Amino acid sequence: MAASVLQTCHVACCANRTPHVLSWSRRGLIAFGTCNSVALYDPEEIKITALLNKHSGRVNAVQWAHRDDCGPETQLVSGGSDNSVIVWEERDGKFASSAVCSGHSGPVCAVDAVALRSGQLLLASTSSDSTVKLWTYSSGAAECLQTISFGSGFMMDVSLALLPGSEVPVLACGGDDRKVYLYVQLNGQFQKVLTLQGHEDWVRSVEWAAKDGELLLASCSQDCLIRVWRLVVKCAPQSDTSAEGAIRMKEDVFEVKENVYAVTLETVLAGHENWVYGIHWQPPVNKGGIVEQPLSLLSASMDKTMILWGPEEESGVWVEKVRVGEVGGNTLGFLGCQMSPDGSKILAHAFHGALHLWYRDQKQQGEWSPGVVMSGHFNAVQDLSWDSEGEFLLSVGSDQTTRLFMPWRRKDCSQDTWHEISRPQIHGYDMQCLATVGRFQFVSGADEKVLRVFRAPRNFVENFANIAGTSLEKLLASTDAANLPEGASTPALGLSNKAVFQGDLATQNTQEEGDNFNSASAQYKESYFQPLSLTEPPTEDHLLQNTLWPEVQKLYGHGFEMFCLASDSTRTVVASACKASKAEHAAILLWSTSSWKQLQALPCHSLTVTQMAFSPDGRMLLAVSRDRTWSLWRRDDPDSLGPRFSLYTHSTKDSAVHTRIIWSCDWSPDNKYFVTSSRDKKVIMWGHRDSSECVGENNSADVSPCSSVLDVGDSATAVAVCPFLLSDQSYLLAVGLESGQIVLYKWRPLEDLSSGSDWSKCAETDASQSHTLVVKRLRWRPKAGQAGRRRDKSECQSKSGHHAWVQLASAGADHAVKIFNINTLTL
């Protein structure tokens, strides 16, 4: 389909929790594995520029194939839990898979590549099948050269280089037996020449660097130490004429093609207090045709720090030059690190997938400052919802977090970028569902029996106004500003976010001045809220600590884990449902948003209600269930008791069109139709046939299919109807499939349904735009146009008055939240 119809506006995702999943190229792009995809991320534009989808398992290792001349890379290598290694090559400015290397019988955990003079690419990959495989790749074809078996041992990392003064490849392998093995290619086969000993725990990472006709090999380990080894060409055996008593390093010697090579231990770097997972040499630079290798080594550790090491100019002793990292928070440390080609930026990825970027401050010598990066969920995204004004997006996931994304308006930048600016909830249970209630309030449900209600603190509203470039006065006027707390904090071992008010902050400050260490805030400072004044999106440690929303209510009533939520447009009612295997637990519970008391229970279904939706006018509630039926509830408002709902109609197993679980449902914007989508691959529009009335206006309760049965070819796991009619008065629907693809259909009510011509497919996501796993939820933005964009009237509306641009948000089990811009005038 035409690329102009469906444009990817934003992708929120994060790095997989494996050490070698990140690589920074000379073209400025950072490649990292996210679930089953390889993401190409531009740190200057702060956005994902492309997703490479081919792996069928988690991507564990990514490596650019660096060139000898320090030019921009055209090849990328990745390895995954699908036991394969894929070579990606640039074609017409885009990367596409060029060869798949199959042969490992276990997940691939590290890869490396080196260009040979013959024009071939030599690849090395290590896997949990206890082997290291060597491959050659040229012109779209790859073949396995050799398999090195390590018996019952595992190699954690591999690194390739060319021996100085020759074109002979040398391979370094570091593994769980605490040794570093060196292999050299002799007569076409790699043979072991040396075993380097010294580490006292698993060797996690190894990396070569070439300098002045010598090779340097860095290795890091779980013994918290980094070792740097020097490999030199030994011209002739040295005569033993050194002064007595002088300390001489032990040399390990091997011979290749009449050349003698010696390996000595250059230095041992001790500075980390926990396992060192990642090391990375600053990339070489090409100065006037001469390639120079800066002696600068970056390391990342589980102690939450990164250290930049280098030799002192006078003594040559290796010392710590820069140390950056996180302080406080309840996170684990860093798994890997990378440095920009010019050495001015350093990047780490943490155990929870977050990227941490620091850049060298131009104004202050030796100072490094944290930079803005993108972020996202590190597990399946289960649900998402726009706020009522369509200015930000909330999502919940199995990574036990609720995240808030919005566009960042920069004065000096014409293009707005989306960022996570708040993490309202960090929980102890996997999150399942959420529903926004008005502008700055939402209800969320997790794998627990309790629903939790959250309300935005004043600090969030102030920062939201700064980053979005909107008026703070208007925002505060739209909320109950008088009682807004400043922020929220989570007590140690607690699940509930407690509100922090202005008075609490004042007390905290006076106690700190008095050095009173008996107070909780003095002993556990990291869990206490500190107000932020943001002009740019917050860093990961601020997101974890200072952007929580206070919990204002808990709702009890369900007997099992929460499954789905819905709120009405009038902001008066929230409906909730939990997992159920019996009719007594499958009842829908209704809650009043003013008192947060339970209004009533709506029993009808016999199994879990999978999704619910209120009609746009708030008069009807639609529910679909695992029992293959749907139910419709009509609202009746007695004066004093608040809203009451009664069963209007429902489908039965006998009359049901769907033959499998109904996954999703939604309403048309004019309240005349609703849609259901099912595991049986069918999508159906329902309403009062032969009548132009809204659903529920007719007392006869005759609701039947108003469309032909649309077969989408795969389990339809999510469906959403655009809140705006198209210029030809047809309805626009988005259908999410189990395969990860999203398809757009137009539907127009017709008298004759037998032809099936009421449906027309108008766009679909291509391989790079689609999710790689199940589409969990689709939500159209409630306002037309593009969120955050400086609107001009010409792009918002066509001459006929119809909206030109609409936005669709999708949540996937592949950890990604995506936002698409759709040009309705091209449909």
Image (cartoon, rainbow, N blue to C red):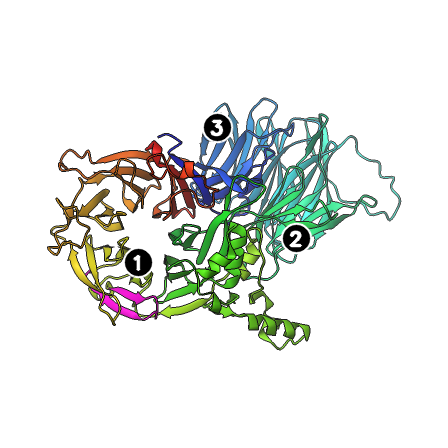
Residue at horizontal 42%, vertical 43%? 819
Mark 1 is surrounded, within 10 Å at the Cα level, by few (under 14), some (14 to 19) or many (20 or more) other residues, namely: many
Residue annotated with mark 2: 324
Task: Decide: is 646 above or below 105.
Answer: below
Residue annotated with mark 3: 143
Who is closer to the viewer here, 597 or 785? 785
Q: Can the viewer see residue 627 in this picture?
A: yes
- Disc 3 on helix, strand or loop? strand
Task: Decide: is 687 above or below 554.
Answer: above
Asked if residue 475 lies left or right of residue 271, the reply is left
Q: Which residues are magenta?
A: 588-606
Frontmost of labels 3 and 2 is 2
Task: Decide: is 176 above or below 329.
Answer: above
Where residue 147 sits in the image (x, y, percent)?
51, 35
Estimate the spatial distance between the alpha carbons at disc 2 and disc 1, rounded to whole Å.
47 Å
Q: Amino acid at mark 1?
A: Asp
Q: Can the viewer see residue 658 in this picture?
A: no
Where residue 14 sits in the image (x, y, percent)?
49, 47
Residue most toward the right?
A: 243
Q: Amino acid at mark 3?
A: Glu
Where residue 566 sits in the image (x, y, percent)?
31, 58
Who is closer to the viewer here, 168 or 570? 570
Where residue 430 sits in the image (x, y, percent)?
40, 59
Residue annotated with mark 1: 568
Quarter of the picture holding the C terminus: top left
Quarter of the picture holding the N terminus: top left
